[in-house]
Structures are given as structure tokens and as C-alpha cells.
Amino acid sequence: MIKEIIFKGIKFKNYNNDEITKILKNKGLFVLPSGPGLSNVNNDKIYLKALQKSDQVLLDSGYFVLLLRIIKNISVNKTSGYIFFKYLLRYLQKKKSKKIISIDPNKKLSKNNNNFLLKRGLDKNRLIHYVAPNYNILKIKDLKLVKLIKKTKPDYIIINIGGGVQEILGYYLKIKFKNRLRIFCTGAAISYFTGDQAPLNKFFDKYYLGWLLRIFYNPKVFLIRYLKAFKLISIVKKAKITVKY
């Protein structure tokens, strides 16, 4: 079985679902780059470096997985943000003594995320929410967040902001705290469960149709985003990909 593929210097781990819970115990930066995100790696060197320096890069993009299979004859497992977040939530429900910081994109979603996590049994006294400012991705700096982390000493940090920014923020925190944290860049995955995103389910996730649901529910945002991702075809075709067993 393939253990890892290296694409553009990014080390993608090829896990099955049974292995997800095991890796959640590890410290480091966990990222799940999307197809649109990967289609921009040639233009966004800061984003690319954040992915290259991550400790666990998972194959969230069904589009990327299909391109690997069709163009490179490389067959790997898709570990979607939807599935990963389900396993993460189950894991955290068993670790109620642990402290969590949830980094959210705005106050409304922060409130919705908090309500959802509390309903799932997480301890309100150990759940801290932080609303992220509008970051300059060319040079992310958030001393307020750094101060909060130093003060509260969380066991887990979940970053629920948009792709292309969350990975860079995660890398910033990884450096600041010398890789002593568990940082999960799960983006909008929690919103599938709160109802703030398209209502993804096991069927749509299994058959790589999450993108279609997102377009249907918010075409103005996602149609253009996914059309731009077509350039990933050319990137994968030209790239040298290393496979490790």
C-alpha cells in the first residue's frame, strides 16, 4: 500500500479511515488542502511553503485524487475534511478534560460552532473561541492569538477559517510554538455539521460530490472557485510525483 506521495514538495499521507484516530494523538500541523487551493501552488509560494512544512497533509480533494489516478496511475485514499472532522469530534468527545481553542471566521459562525460543539458534549469551560481578524497572508502576524495560546495552554487548536489562509496561520503558530501544539486546519468542515454550509452527507462525500453541493448552495462563490481549479490538471500532468510504499 502507498504510504506517501510527494507532489511539489508536499508530503501527502495516504491513510485509511482506521488510521485517522491514531494520528490525532500526534503533535504538529494537520492540513487538508482543497483542489482550488492546490491549483494555486505555482502562484502562491507562501501557501506552498506552509503545506510543505506541515506534519500531516491529508488527501481531502477528491478532484486531486482522481487526477492522480487518471493522469499518473497512482491510486490513493481520499480523506475528506468531512470524514476527518467526524473522527476528530469523536476523539475530542472522549477527551473532555482537554482544552480546545476554536479559531472562527466571524462572530456568527463562532456562536454556531460553539453551540454545535457544546451539544456534542464538549466541556464549555474548556472550549475557547477566537474570532480571527482579516489577515494579510503575505505576512501573517497575530500577537493577540499568540498571547491567548500562551495564557490558556490548549491541547488542541482547530482552525475553521478559509483555505489558503488557515494553512499559513497554522504554519505561523507551528513556528511560534516550536511545533509543540496540535493544530488542525479543518476549514469549513464544521459548517457541514452546523448547517452553515451545504448539508454534506456520507453519500455525497463518498462519491466526490461535495463540490457540486457547494456550487448548488452558493454558486456565486464556489462556481468560479472550482472553474479556476481546472488548471490543476496541467499542474499534475507536468509534475514529478514520488511514491513511497
Image (cartoon, rainbow, N blue to C red):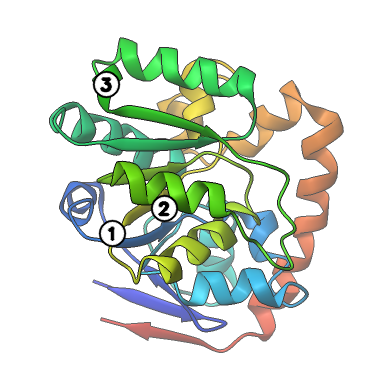
- Which x, y percent locates residue 136? 75, 58
Disc 2 and disc 1: Cα gap in Å?
A: 8 Å
Mark 2 and mark 1 residues within 8 Å of each other at the beta carbon: no
Image height check: is 109 above or below 156? above
Measured from the top left, where is residue 70 in percent x and y? 57, 67
**Residue 198 drawn above or below residue 92:** above
Q: Nearer the viewer, residue 202 or 108?
A: 108
Position of the N terminus, as image quadrant, is bottom left
Between the C-alphas of marks 2 and 3, the distance is: 35 Å
Give the secondary structure at mark 1.
Answer: loop
Q: CA distance from mark 3 to mark 1?
A: 33 Å
Say which of marks 3 and 1 sits in front.
Answer: 3
Q: Which residue is mark 3?
A: 125
Q: What residue is at 64 percent from the left and 54 percent from the top? A: 165
Quadrant assignment, res 195? top right
Tell me which amino acid carries mark 2. Answer: Lys
Label 1: which residue?
A: 15
Counting residues from the N terminus, which is met first, the one under dot 2 or under dot 1?
Answer: 1
Q: Amino acid at mark 3?
A: Asn
User: Relative to 208, does residue 16 appear above or below in the rendering?
Assistant: below
Residue corresponding to mark 2:
78
